[in-house]
Image (cartoon, coloured by chain):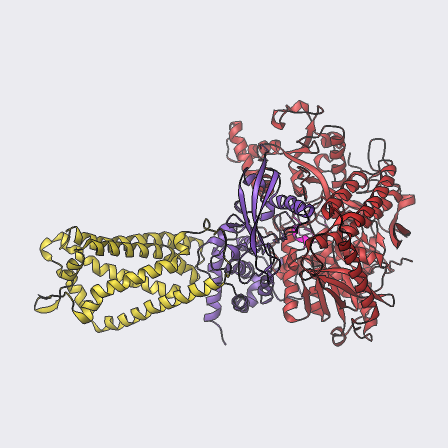
Chain colours: A red, B yellow, C purple
Amino acid sequence: MLDAKIPSGPLDIKWTEYKGHCKLVNPANKRKLEVIVVGTGLAGASAAATLGELGYKVKAFCFQDSPRRAHSIAAQGGINAAKNYQNDGDSVFRLFYDTIKGGDYRAREANVHRLSEVSGNIIDQCVAQGVPFAREYGGLLSNRSFGGTQVQRTFYAAGQTGQQLLIGAYQALERQVALGNVKMYSRHEMLEVVKIDGKARGIIARDLVNGKLERHFGHAVLLCTGGYGNVFYLSTNAMGSNVTAAWKAHKNGAAFANPCFTQIHPTCIPVSGDHQSKLTLMSESLRNDGRIWVPKKKGETRKATDIPEEERDYYLERRYPAFGNLVPRDVASRAAKERCDEGYGVGTSKQAVYLDFADAIVRYGKIEAGKEGKPDMSMEEIIVLGKEVVKEKYGNLFDMYEKITGENPYEVPMRIYPAVHYTMGGLWVDYELQTSVPGLYALGEANFSDHGANRLGASALMQGLADGYFVIPYTLGNNLAEEIYSKAIETSHPAFEAAEKEVASRIEKLMGVRGKQSVESFHKRLGKIMWEKCGMARNKEGLQQAIREIQELKKEFWNDVRIPGSIDEMNPELDKANRVADFLELGELMCQDAYNRNESCGGHFREDFQTPDGEALRDDSNYMYVAAWEYKGEHEWTLHKEPLVYDVVKPTQRSYK
Amino acid sequence: MGLTGISLVLFLIVHAGINACVFADLADPGENGEMFNKAAHFMGSTVLIRITEIGLFAGIILHIVQGLLLTAENKKRRNVGYAVPYTAGSKWYSRSMGLLGTLILLFLVLHLYHFWASARFTGRGLEPVTYNGVEMHNMFGLMKATFSEWWVVIVYALGCLSLYYHLAHGFQSAFKTLGVHNKRYNAMLSSLGYGFSAVITIVFILMPLSFVLGWVG
Amino acid sequence: MEHYNMNLTVKVWRQKNSRAQGNFENYSVKNISSEMSFLEMIDVLNEELIVEGKEPIAFDHDCREGICGQCSMYINGKPHGPWQANTTCQLHMRAFKDGDTIVVEPWRSAAFPVIKDLMVDRSAFDRIVQAGGFISVNTGNAVDGNSLPINKDAADASFAAAMCIGCGACVAACKNSSAMLFLSAKVAHLALLPQGEPERKSRVMNMVAQMDKEGFGACTNTGACEATCPKEISISNIARLNHEYLRASLTAEK
């Protein structure tokens, strides 16, 4: 069933060959072809802008009040590109290799190589748009290392790289809106895919301001709707991030690939109570200088600063002497969970570990004292100097931490805990980013294609922009070339009518439940099940149990949810209910997928598949495939396996000891 | 607004400079306003200055009209107000330029009636005085008479105080409106603005005060 | 940091839709932890309202980490509440004490009509950007990123202006509802970079014209915008905008 359509030939010329031979659409015909883009984050905004520039008639949709709010904006650290500006041995191949290995050998070689090839163009394009990347005194672009790679290939704009890149794409998009090539629909949510003769031909969207359902035709539909981390309720995602568009596509025939691959980021501000609505990331870069520890004594009650050095357990340095605090995200997250589960956690909730900068402050202070030629400076003075250095490097993060927790991280260690951050899984797509439904495409985090089982830092921004700026303009043309004879279909077509009716009746059904429990309370309960049984560590029994619990919860939801207000008005509770209803179905599939994958790899850790010393145990002979799930009916899916073939890279066991 | 404001600032410098001539009386009590009267006479009898005076009135009127239009336009931009207004982010006088301008205008009407209308048209309360064979108005005498009453002095002081706050915001704001964005210059202009406002105000207040307290005249 | 719980009175603007008359409603919320964020306190209140069968308070919010710019509450007489350089979503209940009354209003500006309760329509900002807040470069036209060295100070200043999150607090704070800080941040971001040079004049002229059309007021340099800006965008950008505008007007050829 699933043909990935990977071009033949050697890996490094596949994309060049593809571009050289793919079909083109002439400008006069592009004007007649309509494209719908759902979502306006990095992938969506860049795709809509670029397709508009090419001359297609584009309609773009976002549920936020402006395309500039999409959650790509929150990415902090940076964007990778194989520019080798630092002359430190980087190359297209090395970025490709690092990404494949970082993904624990569960990503497609051809896609990842293409990503690596276009990475340099992204930087050029963004600079031309006026993205103010960090620069050196000589005026050239600055780079830093990130995510434990051995080269400096990360471009950044302080701690707001995502914001600057998104604003660049947003401005390009607004330019096309002004030129009339793109029509923008803000505060609109896509609620159904319309299929005619097996092809995606449009969407049903709801105007969130007045509640009206709208029909929109497109020769092709692009879903750029991000990830589904909010299935866990608490995550670093935005409150509105949801799976609904992707899930509607899935229920209309698009396969969902590797749904259980979720990334848990190790350094987030811990949960402070039941009221918690979201979690905030503290950039990975903090681990370059901070040391992670817990007390050696269970149930320790002393303040962190009162615990003497010999009673502290720097568990990452102890377990992974070679990489220490710089082990990859998945490893660091699991180790923190292990310590807390054993009863060594800190803070009121005991679900946190310390990230301590005291040593770094002294180390930097001494360096500064040396620079000033005062080696006999007192410790107090050294600490003052050291704090200055730390402030310069991480000031904005420290300020954010203090705002949220009320604690001063210059004086007491930060408390951190892992949190759901990114979902590597998503809609299955072929090399052309087309899902298993013809005419329906998925870009960015919404697809599954490039990060395997674990994403490297600074690679999400790269993938979103690669898909939107440099991949889809070619691959979409290749398919739309066959559509130049297809006239736009009137939205009075029975398929549109039926789809709209379907959406309307579902909304009415939701509103008609008139139960007692709020949408939020169901979402919280789903999140708890997912976090406990399908989170950082999973096991067979837990997953089976989770599937049963989610099915029960879904029933309860449809019998007892209370949505105030009415349909024909701005009703955020109804919007949320629509999304949570889909999360309830997705959660079950995620557990199903995690249950099926009898191995541990990347972000997917099965307690029943680990080495004697607690490391992930991959099973390449049985699970080196993409698990693509086809929706068959309520609680029913068929698994299609797309085998992963490694022609160039030879998979090995990852070790950080 | 900024351009007319700056032109009025230039006028204030001339006005304050000429008025300061009354303090010649401090150095030489027998002088009896001679220097001031001569200066006033020069201003009143020079054709070029009389032409400039028309420009000045045009500037004042333009400034007032601009101000009224701006205030009215800006008022319309918030049709529903806040229950709790935001006051901490800006100085009260920056927000009250319209009010301060109106107070200055009221003061100006009185001021023009007292001196300008007398000198030009009515001759109310004016005695002739002759220096070196040239007859001219004894403006000094008019000032002395006018500022012999405390209520006038108080009204003038309040008018000048309004002018201080109007200038404290207006001076630096005018340069921003004209596009000065260099940090160094802005810092300089900011200090200069406060200094200028204070000096102008003190000079103007000192005059009625000096007359009523008998320091001069 | 000592944690404490508090009982509060929250006075909130309620308005059914853009056409309806709005009014203030008083709510009392109990046992609010000092560790909660302000929006989590509103979440708690909303959950109670839903259980009581009432309509929850509608408000804009999304990322809840101070960067998307969607949250927009005017709290106790200041956009985004009492803390400096802060967004509503990052305001925490430590800022309040037991027994406080908190007044919450929507952004007030004719150019930002209320959609419902505390939600306003800020699409005027998008239209200002459409008028010229971009560099006209199609995908694929770019030269190598390092072929154009840019003075580090200029790049840093450009970045400082580009940090604007488009929340509209500047408009909400300004007694004239002026959008000059927002507009000037965009103009400065692009005018400070060599890439912005070719469209420098047309950009500022078109964007200012659009701003006026949207019904924002004129700037009188009170500084309220800068004082409330969550990203501390400098008011000197407005002077720079005036400079750019005068330069463009005086040298215009038609």
Q: Is residue B69 left or right of residue C46?
A: left
Please say if C101 is above or below A20.
above
Which span is picked out in magenta? A70-91
Image location (x, y in percent) of residue C161: 54, 55
Image location (x, y in percent) of residue A573: 70, 52
Image location (x, y in percent) of residue C46: 65, 47
Looking at the image, which residue is at 72% across and 55% down? A575
* In-front residue for pair B87/A444: B87
Please say if A383 is above or below B167.
above
**Which of the 4 quarters of the picture holds residue A348?**
top right
Image location (x, y in percent) of residue B21: 18, 58
* In-front residue for pair A15/A171: A171
On the question of residue A116 being in view, the answer is no
* In-front residue for pair C159/A542: A542
**Which of the 4 quarters of the picture holds residue C91?**
top right
A654 drawn magenta = no
